[in-house]
Image: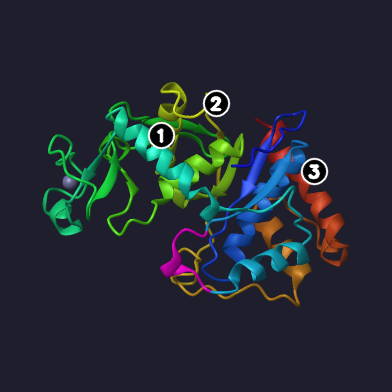
Amino acid sequence: MKQVQSTPTGYIGRFAPSPSGPLHAGSLLAAVGSYLDAKAHQGQWLLRIENIDPPREVEGSAGIICKQLEAHGLHWDGPILWQSESTQVFQDVLNALEQKQLAYYCTCTRAEIKARGGHYDGHCRTLNRSAHEASARFLNDTPILSYQDRIKGTIEVPSEFASEDFVLRRRDQLWAYQLAVVCDDYLQGVSHIVRGEDLLFPSVWQLSLWQCLSEQRILPPRVLPQLAHLPLLLDPQGQKLSKQNHAPALDETKVRENLYQALVDLKLAPSAQLLEAEIEDMLAFGVGAWSQRYIISN
Ligand SMILES: [Zn+2]
């Protein structure tokens, strides 16, 4: 796996879309927020395509996403990381966790878990299930219950959620998001994560796994990343703008308007004149305003 050289400031951020469709206003917001934070720290901004869920992928969308980012002036540093290239790392990490008895296999169905209260109760922990037709779970014995979010402040997560033995590899043998995102962020040297707040609670699982990989020396020791979660954009029905909810793709003839709206949604208060500016100047304004609002004031 490629390791990225860290910058003098040590800041490495990333944008990590899944290729399940073109970017929409909500994913652009995450791209712009993470980009501005990286630039405001003189850091690197990496692009990772999270293509490990083939049933949800839409052919051609990775290429479209790259073109959309470039059209909005969001140029990433270094080569693109394709998450599918990391599957051997995911397997090695799962094997190491299993050897240390920090992962186990589970055959419980969703209906069974629901009938037992909804949160996974560790039912299979001591049952020595085999990997066959089973999901792999993390033995989450030292859960992290809260963390400091750079935008939202202290995040306290209900303990029944935080302590859950979350899934590392799904029953259909696809890698679970939690394992994949932690391994890739970890190995890419990501120091700062800026993303949508739908991941506000699962962040504690990721921090817990990250801490375990470091403390158990499963991967070279690394400090926990700093987290910042952005508000989600909602559709008129109050649902998160997402590909699953059929959010419209960005209008590529309205790059300035799209960027301007992202600056507004990030509460950076762009002036009306900025709408007439070059996209480089809009982003430069964004970096300064982001720095004032989210870095200097903290
Ligand atoms: Zn189970």
Query: What is the three-letter code of the residue carrying label 3?
Result: Gly
Q: Is residue 94 visible?
A: yes
Quadrant where the N terminus is found in the figure:
top right
Going from the N terminus, do you reach mark 1 or mark 3 first?
Answer: 1
Q: Name the residue under label 3.
A: 288
Q: Position of residue 138 (x, y in %)?
A: 31, 38
Residue 66, relative to residue 173: is it above or below? Answer: below
Residue 7 located left or right of residue 120:
right
Compared with 287, 241 (above or below) is below
Which marked residue is nearer to the observer: mark 1 or mark 3? Answer: 1
- Residue bounds of the magenta highlight: 51-58
Are circles 1 and 3 on residues that touch, CB within 8 Å? Answer: no
Q: Give the residue number, with chain letter if any, for mark 1.
A: 209
In percent of the image, x 18 and y 39: which residue is there?
A: 122
- Determine whether 203 is above or below 215 in the image: below
What amino acid is labelled 2 in the image? Answer: Arg
Q: In this view, does 216 lie to the left or right of 4?
A: left
Considering only order in the chain, which callout, 1 or 2, is on the residue closer to the N terminus? 1
109 or 193, which lies in front?
109
Image quarter (top left, top right, bottom left or bottom right) of the C terminus: top right
